[in-house]
Image (spheres, helix red, strand yellow):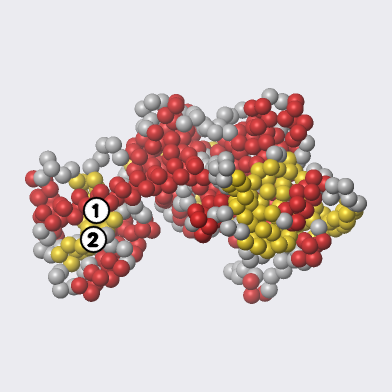
Amino acid sequence: MQDHMIGGRYALRREIGHGGMGVVWEAFDQMLRRTVAIKLMAAGDVASDEAQRRFAKEAMTIARVRHEHIVQVHDYGIDQGSPYIVMELLEGEDLESRLARVHQLPPAAVLSLLRQISAGLDAASAAGIVHCDLKPANIFLARSAYGESVKILDFGIGWTLHEGSDDPSVDRYSTRFGTPAYMSPEQVRGAVPHPLTDLWSLGVIVYRALTGQLPFPTGDVRKVIVSICTDPFPTPSSLDVAHPPELDRFFERALAKDRSRRFQSARELASAFAAICDAETRPAKILIVDDEPDVQLLLQLHFRKRTGRAAYELVFANNGQLALDALERHPDIDVVVTDLNMPVMDGLALLERIPEVNPLARTVIVSAYGDMTNIRRAMNRGAFDFLFKPINFEDLEATLAKTLRHVEEHRRKARSNEENDLLRKFTSAALIERLRSLGPAGAAASEALEATVAVVDVNRFTRVAKERPPAEATRVLNANFEVIVPELLAQGGVIDKFIGDAVMAVFHGPDHLDRALHACLSVRAQMETIAKRAGDDSPYAHGVCIGLSTGNVLAAGVGSHACGQLGYTVLGEAVNAAAHLARAALPGEILVDDAVCAGARREIKLEPAGARGVWPRAEPTAVYRVVRSEPAPRSLAELPTVEV
C-alpha cells in the first residue's frame, strides 16, 4: 500500500504500528504539506457495521478532548468504503517497549510519567470519557526538541458517560473487554464503565514500572480474572526492601477492589505518589504568590542566609492564575503564602481554587494592616493564618513552622483514616452507620424501618466446602462476594451480615425497593458475564440464588453483654422471607413475594414462578421471578441534542 493515496489527500509512506482495530501508517498530507499518522481500519472489519461505528466513535471520542497529553485527531473520513483517522505523528516509543528494555524505572521517572498521564486522564474524565484499555502499549513517550512528553493513545473501546442507562443487562457493557492484566475488578465483571476503572489501570502501570512485575499473574486469562477480583497482590516492600512501607499503603488504595476506596481522581493519585517520593529527602516546599518583584528578591536573600536553620524550597508566582499553574507542576507544595491584591486573579479567588488542585496544602494570607475586611473573608474561606506587610521575617518563620506542623498532622490523620478503613473491614457497616448517627450509647437502641431485604446465596457451595481444602473453598466463596457486594453497595445497600455462603443487604430510605431490585439485577448480570469469561471451572460457575422481600423491619442491637459481644442487625418477616426465597430460588433466579410484586415499578418485569416450598413445614407459596428491567421512557426534553 506504500504511496497509496487516502481520501485524495494523504499519501501512505510506511507502516508504523498496528492494533486491534486497525493499522497505523506514516503519511504525507499533500494539502497542508506535513507528515501525519493515519489509522486505517483492519481489512477484515470493513464489512462490519458495528466495527465501522466503533472506529468512527474512536475518532469522535479523541476529538472531544484537546489536551497536550492525549494524541490529537486532525481529520476523519471514508476512502472507498474504508474509514480512516488522521492524527499527529509522534516520534519515540511506547511505555511497553521501554519497560521491556529496562524492566524497571526509578521513582522520579515514574513520577514524571504519572503526572503527565494523570493530566490527560483528568481531561478525558472532565469530558465524560473513560479509556477502558489503559496500558503501557497505549502510553506513548514522544520525543521533541523540548524533551519527552507522554501521549495517551487508542480510545478504540472508550466509553462516554452519557452512554450509560439504568439497564444492567449483560450485553450492554460486557463488550468493553480490555487487556486482562490491566482491567479493574468491575471491568472484568462487565459493570458500567467508570473513570475510576482507568485509575485502577494506572495503578497497575505504576506498580509494574516500579517493581518490574504485574500485581496479578499473567497467563491463563480465566485465572487472571479470578485473581484480580479475589486475591491480594505482593506489596512492593516485600519485593524490594528499598521500597518504603508508604508505597504499600499507596497501592492498597490505588488497587482497592472496592472502587469507592480508591483515589477519586488522577490528580489525587499523582499527588499521593509525589508525596511518598519526596517525603524523606525534600525540604518543605513553599509557594510565594505576590506581584511585587522586591518580595521575591527579599525572601530569596533571607532564606539563603538561614539555610542552616530552615530548609525551605521556594517557588514563586506573580498572580493567582500562575500560582495554580505552579501547584499543577509541584503537587508536593506544603504551604501557599499569598498576597490579597494582585492582577489577573487575586488572593481570595486563589484561596477558593487551591483545594481543587492540592487538598493538603495550607494557605497563609499576606495583606496590609488596614485590610481587615478581606482578611476576615479569607479566614472564613479556609485560610490557615495571616501576615501583615511589611513582612517581619521572624513572624514569617514562626508562621511557616506552625503551618508545616499542621500540614504534617493533617497527613498523619489521613494515614490514620487509612488504618481505620482497614479496621472497618472487620466491623459491620450497619453498626458503623448506627454509631455515627446515635453515638455508642444509642447503638443498642431499637427502631422500626420500612426497608427491603436482599439475600444473595452462592449456589451449591456446601458441596465445594466438603470437597475442597479449606483455603481453596474460602477463596471460591470470597471470589463470589467480591462481585456481589460492590453492586449491593452501589445502590445504597448496607451489608448487614454474611450468613455462611450468603450475604444479606438492607436497603432503606427513598426508593429502597427500586434500588434493591436494580442491585440484584446488576449482581445477576455481572455474575453471568464473569462466569462466561472465567469458564466452567471458575469460582463463578455456581451462580447465585437471590431472594427479595420488603416491609417493616426492626433494627436493633442484639447479643449478650455477658460475653461482651453485640451486633446491630435487622429482624422481621421481610428478613425471614428474603432468606427463604433465596433458598427456594434456582441458580440465576431472583425470587420475590407479593409485597415486592405490589410495590415494584412498571419497568421491572416480573412473571409468576409457580408455587415453591418457601416456608419450612408449610404449603407451597406462589412466588414471582424478576425477568429484567426496561429503561424508563424519556421525554423529548431529556433526549440529547445532536449537532449536524
The residue lying toward the viewer, choosing from 297 and 485, is: 485
Residue 428: image x %, image y %? 57, 47
The residue lying toward the viewer, choosing from 390 and 433, is: 433
Residue ID for mark 2:
385
Dot 1: within a 10 Å radius of its alpha carbon, few (fewer than 14), some, or many (20 or more) residues? many
Residue 35: image x %, image y %? 45, 47
Residue 465: image x %, image y %? 72, 30
Name the element at disc 1.
helix
Q: Earlier in the sequence, mark 1 or mark 2?
A: 2
Residue 152 visible within the image: no
Quarter in which the N terminus is drawn? top right
Q: Exactly how many numbered labels are in the figure?
A: 2
Vertical order, 470 against 587 (above or below): above
- Horizontal side, residue 381 vs residue 389: left or right: right
Amino acid bearing label 1: Thr
The residue lying toward the viewer, choosing from 188 and 72, is: 188
Residue ID at (44%, 31%): 236
Residue ID at (72%, 53%): 575
Residue 314: image x %, image y %? 20, 49
**Residue farthest along the front direction in this orientation:** 562
- Do callouts 1 and 2 mark residues in contact (Cβ within 8 Å)? yes
Q: On residue 403, which mark appears? A: 1
Name the element at disc 2.
strand
**Distance from Cα at disc 1 to Cα at disc 2:** 8 Å
